[in-house]
């Protein structure tokens, strides 16, 4: 199946580059440019569709199409109003929790590409009522301070309603094996998908790497690219919950850092998630065991990934998910284990190179005589 050597420091630098770009849902253009640069030399075909998804093709056998998806967007905020005093009011982009916002440094990006630092303000405890100190403020009570003294100063900076805001955090090492930063959901998964795509040496299926847009606001990019590619089989790469924390019962951890990538069994609630195709779960486990890759099995009670949209394309697509366990998701201080991500690369590469025409044909609809 070819080589599996992965330079650890080089991969961390890739994660830093991807996480260092401002790109919330619907405003992924700078991430898109970086992805194109990273895959151009490894692709036999490269497109950007009308919604903004990047689609890279690595030709294989040609009889079947394999879709490998990871989303480019991150959570963030829209500027929704500019006060006369120069403060910015905001509305969320995706699943932004107020608990993660208070007193954070942020980056404000204008339409013309300028980036300014700001802070999310709230009156200090010295001026708050006792009952206010015990409450999580609503987003309507929060504001962004960019150092301006008036609306005119904000306008002079080029900041307008509709501009986007993300957390201001760099990727940093924690100890020897852990990394922390913003946007791991899903720039860490995107780094895994890109690296695996670069490393795939022999595939009997045509491999379509798709860096999707607007996953955090409804899996939108995955829906359109799945329709365009019409894959026979698919795999989504994303982060997942690691609740291995003090005070949390072990039965609620979902995954644990350092125990390997997670092979998803199911996620979401009711109609909002996915129950992963059994034969794909079995194949991922088979590949992991063959290559000696540690793995976890994941049943996530809430949330979902691009796989849910891809699975329901046309008459249905057998779809799996490889997840990278991550603590404190949708916060500025997400934490992951670099070894889990590196093993996820190996698993995705091994799975792709193990796809035979016979296996894929066995997943397709069959006429019963």
Image (cartoon, rainbow, N blue to C red):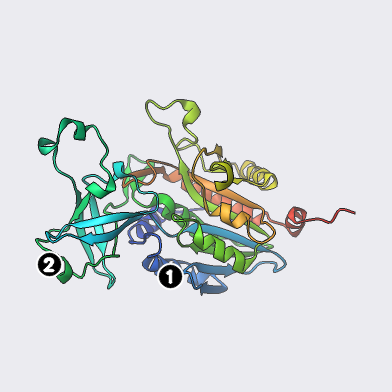
Q: Which residue is more in the foreground, 336 or 28? A: 28
Residue 8 in view in this figure: no
Residue 25 in view in this figure? yes
Please tell me which residue is depicted at 39% across the width and 49% down the height of the picture: 95
x then y, percent, for residue 102:
24, 44
Dots 1, 2 in contact, CB < 8 A: no
Q: In percent of the image, x 19 and y 56: which residue is there?
A: 118
x, y percent for residue 28? 39, 65
Q: Quadrant of residue 86?
A: bottom left
Q: Quadrant of residue 244?
A: top left
Q: Quadrant of the C terminus?
A: bottom right
Farthest-out residue, right: 369
| Residue 153 numbered tag | 2
Label 2 sits on a secondary structure element that is helix
Between 149 and 72, which is closer to the camera in this rendering? 149
| Mark 1: few/some/many CA within 10 Å (<14, 14-19, 20+) | few
Q: In the figure, is residue 100 to the left or right of 38? A: left
Q: Is residue 280 above or below residue 223?
A: above
Residue nearest the observer in this picture, 60 or 143: 143
Q: Residue at x 74, y 53 (%)?
A: 363
Crowding near the residue tagged with mark 2, few <14, some 14–19, many ≥20 C-alpha atoms within 10 Å: some
Number of marks in the rendered image: 2
Q: Earlier in the sequence, mark 1 or mark 2?
A: 1
Label 1 sits on residue: 37
Q: Which mark is residue 29?
A: none
Look at the image and tell me in which quarter the N terminus lies: bottom right
Residue 117 image offset from top left, x and y in percent: 20, 58
């Amino acid at each position: 199946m070819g080589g599996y050597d992965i330079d650890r420091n080089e991969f961390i630098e890739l994660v830093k580059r991807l996480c260092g770009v401002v790109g919330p849902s619907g405003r992924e253009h700078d991430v898109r440019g970086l992805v194109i640069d990273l895959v151009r030399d490894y692709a036999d075909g490269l497109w950007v569709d009308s919604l903004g998804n990047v689609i890279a093709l690595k030709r294989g056998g040609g009889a079947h199409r394999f879709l490998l998806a990871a989303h480019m967007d991150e959570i963030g905020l829209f500027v929704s109003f500019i006060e006369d005093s120069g403060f910015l009011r905001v509305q969320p982009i995706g699943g932004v929790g107020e608990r993660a916002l208070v007193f954070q440094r942020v980056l404000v990006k204008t339409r013309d590409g300028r980036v300014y630092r700001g802070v999310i303000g709230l009156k200090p405890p010295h001026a708050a009522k006792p009952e206010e100190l015990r409450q999580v403020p609503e987003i309507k009570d929060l504001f962004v301070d960019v150092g301006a003294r008036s609306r005119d100063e904000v306008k002079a900076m080029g900041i307008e309603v509709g501009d986007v805001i993300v957390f201001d955090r760099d990727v940093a090492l924690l100890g020897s094996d852990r990394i922390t930063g913003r946007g791991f959901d899903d720039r860490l998964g995107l780094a895994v998908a890109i690296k695996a795509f670069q490393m795939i040496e022999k595939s009997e299926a045509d491999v379509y790497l798709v860096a999707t847009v607007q996953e955090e606001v409804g899996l939108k990019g995955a829906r359109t690219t799945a329709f365009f590619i019409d894959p026979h089989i698919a795999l989504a790469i994303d982060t997942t919950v690691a609740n291995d924390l003090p005070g949390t019962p072990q039965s609620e951890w979902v995954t644990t850092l350092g125990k390997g990538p997670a092979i998803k069994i199911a996620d979401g609630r009711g109609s909002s998630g996915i129950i992963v195709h059994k034969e794909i779960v079995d194949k991922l486990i088979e590949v992991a065991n063959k290559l000696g890759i540690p793995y976890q099995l994941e049943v996530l009670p809430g949330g979902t990934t691009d796989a849910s949209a891809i699975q329901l394309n046309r008459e249905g697509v057998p779809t799996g998910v490889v997840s990278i366990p991550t603590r404190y998701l949708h916060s500025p201080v997400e934490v992951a284990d670099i070894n889990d991500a590196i093993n996820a690369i190996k698993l995705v590469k091994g799975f792709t190179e193990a796809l035979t025409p016979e296996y894929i044909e066995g997943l397709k609809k069959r006429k019963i005589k």
